[in-house]
Amino acid sequence: MKKYTVSVTKEARGKLRKYLKYLKDVKKNSQAAKSVMQDFRETRKELELVAGSLKEPDNTKLRQADVKRINFKRHSYFLLYKIEDSKAIIVTMVHSLEDPDTYLS
């Protein structure tokens, strides 16, 4: 089984911080923020093993941008990533109520 090296772009780290800050400061729920962070870590770890095997996205713009998607297990977030050689590069994090097309520029 091929194992991928996973890296996280500055944009993706910024989005993660934004979501965590919202949960802590606006929703006043630090436990939810911790849970989302744990889910992020687990999803990133899973990506090391499955990055190349996930199906191509149904979304035409994502396919054209050569971006794939991996959903969080327990939360309504997903990661968009690209594969370059044996690297999976997380380009952004998106909440399921948001339009992922807006992150493809």
Image: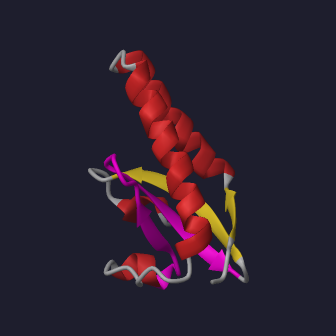
Q: Nearer the viewer, residue 57 or 54?
A: 54
Looking at this view, name the residue that lies furthest to the front.
Answer: 1
Q: In this view, does 42 lie to the left or right of 60?
A: right
Q: Where does residue 90 sit, x and y in percent of width and height?
A: 59, 61
In the image, what residue occupies the spot 52% across and 51% down? 42
Q: Is residue 49 left or right of residue 98?
A: right
- Residue 75 included in the magenta stretch of the image: yes
Q: In this view, does 73 lie to the left or right of 15?
A: left
Quadrant containing the N terminus in the rendered view:
bottom right
Looking at this view, name the residue that lies furthest to the left.
Answer: 97
Q: Is residue 91 visible?
A: no
Q: Say above or below: 59 vs 8.
A: below
Q: Where does residue 64 sit, x and y in percent of width and height?
A: 47, 84
Q: Say above or below: 59 vs 40.
A: below
Q: Where does residue 73 sit, x and y in percent of width and height?
A: 37, 54
Q: Is residue 101 visible?
A: yes
Place residue 35 in its image quadrant: top left
Instruction: Count every numbered label the image shows and give the total.
Output: 0
- Residue 34 included in the magenta stretch of the image: no
Q: Say above or below: 37 vs 70.
A: above
Magenta segment:
64-84
In the image, what residue occupies the spot 66% across and 82% down? 2
Q: Say above or below: 18 vs 82.
A: above
Place residue 58 in its image quadrant: bottom left
Q: Nearer the viewer, residue 15 or 43?
A: 43
Q: Where does residue 14 sit, x and y in percent of width and height?
A: 59, 41
Q: Which of 85 and 97 is in front in this view?
A: 85
